[in-house]
Amino acid sequence: VVSSTATVLLTPYTDSACNVTTGAGTPSGHSLAAVAGTSTFTAFSYTKAETIYLKATTGVLTMACSTAVAVSPAADSVLVFTTQPSATATAGTAYAQQPAVTVRDAYANTATASTAAITLTAYTNSGCTTLATGTLGATTNPLTPTSGIATFAGIYHTLATTIYLKATSGALTTACSTITTISAGTANTVALSGPAIASKASCAAAYTITSTDTYGNISAVSANKVFNLAAT
């Protein structure tokens, strides 16, 4: 009807009959008055990466349902820890739960085509602003995501402390993990500290024996030990 100026509303649905609304994404530019009986939409957009059908309605007129529209993710925007690292771990031993980092667009869709290499770095605070000492190890770091998700393997840290992992990739918004408390490994080295002995005849001095793991973390011995000291 060329004389019609009725406003046409487009609503996204998940089925080809336009019966089931999506409820997930948000449409914009979806309402437009007809000109000479036609509404030509030029600014319609939708925020959820999924397949939708558009239902056109206006007043009491019979509705129309479009063909399928496959909505893809927008540009890479933010990193998110979708699997957090283990809450506890042992120095030098791979975490029982390895972290996974997902690349998302600005609308929280997984950026399935992303090739953004993701780097993990250890920090000492929950804001991931103070670098941790010690060594963070991994099978591969940085890691390129698969279908938008970088699932790390072999992550470990050598210092007995508490750390957070920061995920970075170029200009993308970074992510900071939950805390991991790292304990010392099994003691395998002992060290003696104390004053030098001036004379073999007299040795009235206090000495300290310290047991450490492979990475120099102080570690308690597993059972009572007897240490023999001899002056030379």
Image (cartoon, rainbow, N blue to C red):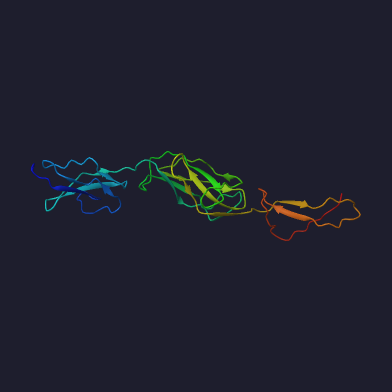
Q: List x then y, in percent, for residue 169.
A: 46, 41
Q: Is residue 154 visible?
A: no
| Residue at the extreme bottom of the image, as rendered | 224
Q: List x then y, in percent, for residue 209.
A: 76, 55
| Residue at the extreme right of the image, as rendered | 201
Q: List x then y, in percent, for residue 183.
A: 61, 55
Q: Please state which of residues 14 and 2 is positioned toward the viewer in this rendering.
A: 2
| Residue 88 in the figure: left or right of residue 205 | left
Q: Please state which of residues 74 and 183 is positioned toward the viewer in this rendering.
A: 74
Point 13% across, 52% down: residue:
59
Q: Quadrant of residue 32?
A: top left
Considering only vertical position in the picture, is 228 above or below 35? below
Quadrant in which the N terminus is drawn:
top left
**Total tally of numbered discs in the picture:** 0
Q: List x then y, in percent, for residue 63.
A: 15, 50
| Residue 143 in the figure: left or right of residue 53 | right
Point 26% across, 47% down: residue:
28
| Residue 117 in the figure: left or right of residue 42 | right
Q: Is residue 217 visible?
A: yes
